[in-house]
Every structure is written in structure tokens, then in C-alpha cells.
Image (cartoon, grey):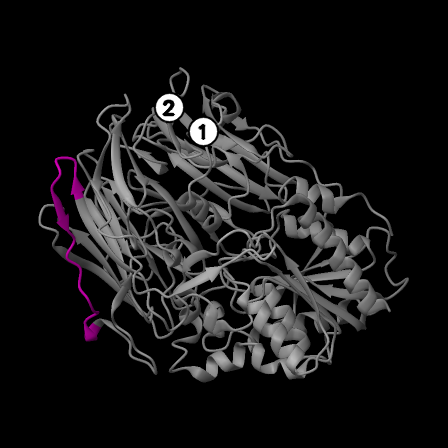
Amino acid sequence: MDSPDLPRQFARTRRFTLGAPRGFTVSPDGERVLFVRSTAGDDPVSRLWVFEDGTERLLADPLGLGDTGPVPEAERVRRERARETSQGVVAFATDLHARVAAFALGGALWVVETAGGAPRRIRTAGPVVDPRPSPDGTLVAYVTGGALCVVGVDGTGDRALAEPEHAEITYGLADHVAAESMDRQRGFWWSPGSDALLVARVDTSLVQRWWLSDPAHPELPPRAIRYPAAGTANAETSLHVVRLDGTRTEVRTPERVEQEYHVAEEWTDGAFEYVPTAHWDAHGPLITLQTRDQRSLYVLEVDPESGETQMVSHRRDHAWLDLLPGTPRRLESGRPVHPWHPRDHTRGLRVGSTLTPSGLHVHEVLGSTGERVWFTASYEPTEIHVWSFDHADDEPGAERGTGTLRQASEGPGVHTAAVGGDTVVLDSRTPEGQTVTVLRGGERVGQIAVFSEEPVVRPRPHHLTIGERDLRSMLFLPSWHEPGSAKLPVLLCPYAGPGIQLVVHARGWWTIVAQWFAEQGYAVLITDGRGTPGRGHAWEKAVHGDQLTPVLDDQVDALHAAAELFPDDLDLARVGIRGWSFGGFLAAGAVLHRPDVFHTAVAGAAPTDLRFYDTHWKERYLGHPDIQTSAYEKCSLVAYAHRLERPLMLVHGLSDDNVLPVHMLRFSAALLAAGRPHTVLPLPGASHLVTQEDVAANLLRLELDFLGKTLNG
């Protein structure tokens, strides 16, 4: 059945992200909220805004600031790691009191005062990446050409504080693994006194070099990428205290974990190769170090004068250690906030000596005000709420403390927040869409407008809890379908991998796309199985050593359980599966290993040989490829190419520097060598996130056409 042009709207709105406010920063007194947002659901240019005294005010419009040049390569890479899809002011930073904001446009540095006045361009020695004002608002630190520099907000005193010793060194930038797999996008942090910075020095000399070319433009040279594939050398990251007076102290960190704090398994590497977090609060610098095998983590306090470190806590695990976003941190009193795992295997928080309740699964720590910590958590995995927890002293070793726990969000949805003073900016994604509410002292004082377009196809999911493992699923049926009137071909649209939940009580782009496929005559099923977040420690780690078998088993179980609930609506003789990234890996694996269940597949950006994915992300689940060889062989798809007996379409962006095109090309070559017909759709110029409007729109249509031909004849 025909439906409105959802593919074109999906592409034009960049997956319905344009016009949505984001990046909220709340001043410590709660008076000002800064954020970025474009002016309409199809406007790709983000502006900088402030919400104050109940109203919004535009601070910086890039269209009025003139053309300032191309985006620097380091900034392009930063945006790719952050999955940034818009233009204009895509990121900003402020001083401590949110009175001065800095941002970069085309490599040019701009500052604007939130009290009023036009943005001012600050001349710098080179193209600017990641500008950040000092806490006192008098200076801006930035990176250019791999050097960390500082300049006054009045435009004076521009100078380098740390310059790279050779071309493979940068100061102040996150390396590939930190940004892509540890969610650390930053590489420098101001001291509270505005007189020094904690700076990451990254040396990629030992990291293997790969070359990524654009076959559609043979006149252009290939791009060199330092990509640390599983089992190969990582970048070397060290930390340094760099002062404005020109002096510098290297932070002295331990090279290896002490044996008593580590768990040894088949593959053990106790070298501290990763710096997952770093920041500098009123109590001094606080950093974390993680071992190469990811089973041990130290939290260290740093003496900024001597560079000496002292371990304040440690964690270890037999499989791998979760990195809980927003931790570790310290409250105003200095009390620490750390993750903890109670007996029911959920992930909780330890605030000082006080524990959050067992059964409440913590997703992220959002911030703290005084002795109150704010975080997102859930009792039911399909709903994520904003909570606050006031610390209270308790006896050491108690199972749970006596702190005051409050839920700040209400109703089904995925809620998050930004906080400052007694102000909470509540960002809620519900089945009806996004709303942003500003609360002060618990009372509503206003809303920040959301300009995202309403989808021409509205999702109508049936939320299910099915199978022996109570799998959370969503089933989408056509709006025109009469229950029991006809059996529909089934299309599975999972991600089902680490770090992402799709089955939630909120409208996301994936639910809109699922309903669009349903309107074309499919029963569409999305399931979060083992390995996805939200259901505790044991659930996520059920994929340790095997990222394919349990994940695929859960998809099959959910399919059969859904068919039992809707026996007259789902046709198990016609089952397809489509996915992107890990979902693409799962889709290809489904037709290779379970052709008895799956009859066709579309696999986008699929990592088909897991030895070619990065160290931190892949060794976390499968270990070292030279030692746990069987784990990689079991999960990689290339070795099973000869098994293909169902139609398969491979889609891949040829500029993808996350899952590189080598995955698609080697898998296709193995399929060809085995004499297995398949379809390849290369996307010239496309990265891991396809943003070209015509390509993104027509890709959905081509998938639909392929599925229709291979499922319905």
C-alpha cells in the first residue's frame, strides 16, 4: 500500500534530528540554559541559544557571521566520532558561570557573552578545534595543528602551551579509541583556578596506518587513518599539567595493574593502555586508567604540582569492566561517586558510603549539585527516568543506604536532563515525541521549543515481553491491516548490540522507519536481546566470547514467540532481516547460520571480520585475536561465506572510517570465491552515518525493493 514520502522526509530531516534542541549547559546558579538548535525540522544549520527569565534568546547565528573557511580535518574527525549531522554551531563550551561561550565555525574562533552583544571573532594562529573558555572567562584554550593553544577573550596573548614533537603527536585531542569506543571526546581540562590545564598527549606512531580512498574521485589522494585494529598497537596516551606560565609536569601513572587488583584469565594484559576519563574539579585532577584486557580500572587523584598519583579506588571483573558515563566524580564535599554491582546484577551507584537501591539499573550520571547526584536509571528496561539521590552517611558494608531517592521524570519514555543550581532541564522522549521542560525548585518555569518535524508515518508499536528470557520487543503492523485477515511477511529490524536500546517507550527514528516498512505490507519486529544494555550486568555479559550465537538465538526466539501471539498475522515462511553496523553484522549472520528461519537479508555497514574492528570495542567482548582465535572465528562471517543460500544485499559507505569498507569487500570476495550470488551496493562518499539526502532516501526504497523481490517473488 502507498504511503506518504517518508524516505524523503527521513533524509531531509537527518533522521528527525534537525530542529531538536540539544547540548544543554546550565549555569551553576540555575539562571541560564545554553543549547544549540536549528530553526526548523529541515534546517541543517544549528544556532546557539540561551533560555533565561522564561524566554529564549538567540546568541549566535552562523548565517550572519560570514563564511569562515572549511572545517579542519581534526574537527571533521571529531564530528564523525560524535555522529554529528548538522552544520553551523554544532558544539560550544562556556566558562564556569556560563557568561562567556566559545565555538568554532569553519576553523575560526568566536566568543559571545550571554548577557548580550554580538559574537566576536578572535584571530588565532591556525584553524581552531574544540575551543573551551577558562573557568574565569578570560581565556580560551583550543587545539590547532595538534598543538594546545590559549588566547584571551579580548584577542590578545595567543600562544602555544604544548606543541607536538613530530607529526604523529597531538596535544588536547582524543584518539580514535577514546572517542569511538570510550565516549571521551575531549583531550584537555581547565583547572578551577584558570591557571593550568590537564592535557592528553597522544602518540599514534605505533598504530597501524590504513588508507581510505574515494573510488568515485580518483583524482584525490587517499586519506591516511591510524586505526588500532584488534590485537594491534594502540595509541600511547599520557597526561600532563600544562601551566600558563610555561611550566609543565607529566602525570606519573602506574604502567601496570598490581596483581592483587587484577583477574587473570586465558588472555591477560595488565598494562594500563587506556585513559577512559579525566577531569579537574575543586579537589584536583581525577583520572581513570584501564588495562588493555579491560578487567581492571584504577581511579587516581593527581597532585598537579608534582604529577604524583594516588589510587583512591579500583574495580575488577572476570569479563570486562563497564564504563559508566559520568563516573567517577566527586560531590562538593569530596565524597566519591562510583558504580557498584549488587547481588541482582543490576548496575547501581555508590555515593560515599551510601548505595542506590538494588534493582534500580543506572545508565548515566548526569551531574551533581552540592551533595545531590543526578542520574538516569530504570526498574523496567523500556523506560529510562531521571533520578536524584541525596547522600546520607551510612555504615560501611550496608547493602543499601539511607539517602533520599527522588524520581524527577514521569510517564513512559526515555528521559534525561542537565542540571545547575536548583534548575533541571528535563529532556523527554515519549511515544508522542520530544519535549524539553525547565524546572526550578521542582516547579515548571518554561519549555524550550522543539522544531523537529512530525513524521508523515506515525509509529503504532505493540510492546511485547516474550520468550523464556522475557525479551522486550516491539511489533509493528500496517495501520490498514485487519487482525487475522491475512498473514504478512515478517521483517526483523534489530540492532541488538552493545550500548544501544531500541525497544523503549519512546518515538525514535527507528520506530518511524519500522512503521513505514509495516505500511508497505510487513509485520516488523524489533527485539533487544542479550548483550544490550538496561537489564543488568549478567545480561550484557552473556555475549562474552561469542557475540553472535546468543544474539541470533534471541532474535529467533522472539520471532517464534511473536508468531505464537499473532498466529494469523505473521508468515514464518517469509522472514527477512535488515540492520546497520552491528545490526548489519547480525542480518548477514542470520542468513548464513539460520537459513531455516531467515529467507533474505539487507546488511549495512556490517563488520564481517571482527579482527578489523578496533581494540577497545572488540577485545572487550572477544579477547585478543591471537589468543582467543576461536572466538573471532566463531563470530566473523567471512569464513562462513560458503554457507550462503539466501538472498543477501551488502551496503557500505566507501568513506566509512569506523567500519571500514574492507569488511564488505573481503566478505563479497569470499562469497564470490564460494560461488554464492549476492548483491553489493557501494555508497561513494558516505561515512558510517549516511547523511546525503538523495542517498539516504533512496537507500530505504532500494531496501524495500530488494526485500519485496526476494520475499514475495
Residue 171 visible, this angle: yes
The amino acid type of the residue labelled 1 equals Thr
From the image, which quarter does the C terminus lie in?
bottom right
Who is closer to the viewer here, 638 or 102?
638
Q: Are marks 2 and 1 in contact (CB under 8 Å)?
A: yes
The x and y percentages for residue 517 are: 76, 55
Relative placement, left or right, of 489 versus 190 is right
Quadrant in the rendering for residue 579 = bottom right
Badge 2, how many Cα within 10 Å: few under 14, some, many 20+? many
The x and y percentages for residue 178 are: 37, 56
Q: Is residue 523 highlighted in magenta?
A: no
- Cα–Cα span, label 2 and label 1: 10 Å
For image coordinates 75% across by 41% down, the residue present is: 456
The amino acid type of the residue labelled 2 equals Arg
Question: Dominant secondary structure of the magenta stretch?
Answer: loop
Who is closer to the viewer here, 683 or 593?
683
Number of marks in the image? 2
Q: Label 1: which residue?
A: 68
Q: Is residue 245 highlighted in magenta?
A: yes
Q: Label 2: which residue?
A: 121
Bounds of the magenta segment: 242-260
Relative placement, left or right, of 358 versus 712 is left
The x and y percentages for residue 349 are: 35, 55
- In the image, farthest residue toward the left: 306
